[in-house]
Structures are given as structure tokens and as C-alpha cells.
Amino acid sequence: MATDTPNFPAPVLIGYFAKRRTARVEWLAAPEVREICSVSACIAEAPDGWIDRWAHNDLWVFDTPERARDVVEAAQRQHFDVFAYRLVPLLFRDGRIEPYALPAVAPSATSEAFESLGFDAVSRSTGTSFECSPLSCCNLAGERGANQWCLFDTLDQAAAAAADWSRGGAEPGPYVVVEVLRQRAADGTERPSGVAP
């Protein structure tokens, strides 16, 4: 998915993460949303006990799709998708934009099996794992114009939201912007939204 603002640095691949396939929740005031693919694990859940495996990198994601999938219990893997995350190396704090020095990570390159779904603005106040994605966590998808995956279509939209939310009105900041890519099914078909095959 193309970005529409050349002034922002290009998103940097930071790694992979498995999330439970999650259909739109009934209370979300955004009928165009079909599925929650937010970076936050508040609604689209992370695998149980993933932190305890201590297989993640310094950005708290995994260096390969295989490692991301391996932390999911074998009996549950059919209910999870693997995502790739590309982080824009900027921090949105109190409405200001600051450089964000990323720790040295070396994830494997994404393959053609990964498709960009959009961009998320997500809080990261502790410097460890991602926290809240207000599009889903704070029911702001309708107000902000989320796409069918509960993400922004463009980096511009996500950056504007990150700057606004870092000043208040959503979960406490600071915020980062992350491009979200999902690994297609092995046969290349689209899975039903939020439904395990």
C-alpha cells in the first residue's frame, strides 16, 4: 500500500507477530469494518504466553514468520494469522514529532505472501510491547474513517491521528505509526473475516 507523503521516512520492517483472527465487534461504531487487524492485542488477541517463550526481538515482535507462528499452540494455529509490521521511525509525543531510534533488529525480509492492509496509530509508552490502537480500543474507527481491517488507508491519516491522540482524547501516548501486512493463506485465497477455516 503506497504512502502519500514523501516527508515521512519510509516504514522499516521490525518483525512479525501472530494474532487471533477477529471479526468486527458489535459495539464498534464503524459498519465498514469487517475485521480487527490492529497492532494492539486488546481485541485481536496475541497468542497465550508468547512473552514467556522469550523468542521475540528488542521491539517485542519476532524475526521470522515461523517464529511468530511457533509461539501459537499447535491446536490453535488455524485461528491465527501472521502479520508483518513496518514501523515509521518517528515518535508522536504531545502533538510533536520526534525521531525514534529503533534498536538493532534483523528480521527476515517479507515475501510476496504478505499483503499490506493499511496503517495503525498505536501507543507505545513503555518502549516494550505495543499498547492501544484507538481505532478499535477507543471505538474511534467510525470517527476517523477506518478501512475494512480497522486500519487507516494511508500513512498521512495514521500520522495525523497519532499526533492528535498523543495530545489526549484517546489512550495516553506517545504513539507510533505501523504499516500492517498480513500473510496470505497458503493457497492464496482470502480467509473469511474473523472466522477460522
Image (cartoon, rainbow, N blue to C red):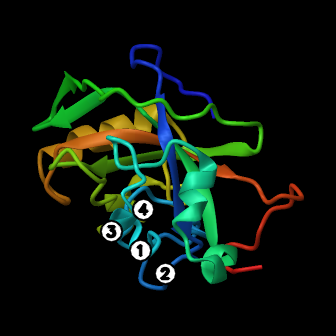
Who is closer to the viewer here, 194 or 31?
194
Q: At x 47% / y 54%, what residue is drawn?
A: 145
Q: Which amino acid type is shown beneath numbered disc 4? A: Ala
Q: Is residue 59 left or right of residue 32?
A: left
Q: Which secondary structure, mark 1?
A: loop
Question: Label for residue 25?
Answer: 2
Q: Amino acid at mark 3?
A: Cys
Could you say whether the residue bearing mark 3 is in a helix, strand or loop? helix
Looking at the rendered structure, the number of numbered marks drawn on it comes to: 4
- Precedes in sequence: disc 2 or disc 4: 2
Residue 148 visible within the image: no
Front in this rendered view, residue 168 or 44:
44
x, y percentage for residue 58? 32, 40
Q: Pointer 1: what residue? A: 43
Mark 2 or mark 1, earlier in chain: 2
Occupied quadrant, residue 141: bottom left
Q: Nearer the viewer, residue 197 or 156?
A: 197
Give percent across and percent down for residue 22: 56, 75
Tell me whether circle 2 and circle 1 mark residues in contact (CB < 8 Å): yes
Quick check: 54 left or right of 110? left
- Element carrying mark 2: loop
SS category of the residue bearing label 4: helix
